[in-house]
Image (tube, rainbow, N blue to C red):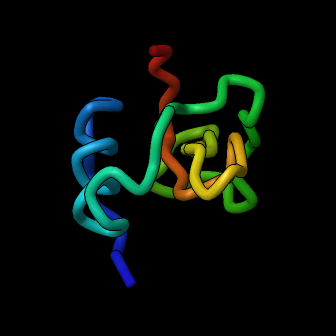
Amino acid sequence: METMREVASLSEIQNILDGGVFPKGYLSNIHIGEDTKREHRTPGDKWGECTYMVLADFDGYTNQCVGYCNFFEGT
């Protein structure tokens, strides 16, 4: 299982997931869901104030959660 990594962009997340955590080309449409914004359960943690879901499509499913991040960067 992949542990948390510090990343600065959506492209870094895509590189970690595609060919790293998941087989190369298995995921498509990897993006951060703007409407998935949630406040953290533990205030003051190092993630900041909010968490967003990292979503992707695979095996006929769309917008499935494949990870989390603490920033929104639209595609």
Residue at 45% in and 50% down = 27
The foreground one among 30 and 8 is 30
Q: Residue furthest front?
A: 60
Question: If the image is split into quadrants, where does the N terminus sit?
Answer: bottom left
Q: Residue furthest bottom?
A: 1
Which quadrant holds residue 10? top left
Q: Is residue 2 above or below residue 25?
A: below
Q: Is residue 47 left or right of residue 33?
A: left
Q: Position of residue 3 (x, y in %)?
A: 34, 75
Q: In this figure, what is the number of numbered marks?
A: 0
Q: Is residue 20 above or below residue 29?
A: below
Q: Position of residue 36 (x, y in %)?
A: 74, 36
The foreground one among 51 and 9 is 9
Which quadrant holds residue 46? bottom left
Q: Is residue 30 left or right of residue 25?
A: right
Q: Is residue 5 above or below residue 54?
A: below
The foreground one among 42 and 30 is 30
Q: Residue furthest top?
A: 75
Residue at 26% in and 57% down = 24
Q: Position of residue 66 (x, y in %)?
A: 55, 57
Residue at 62% in and 45% down = 53
Question: If the image is split into quadrants, where does the C terminus sit?
Answer: top left
Residue at 63% in and 39% down = 50
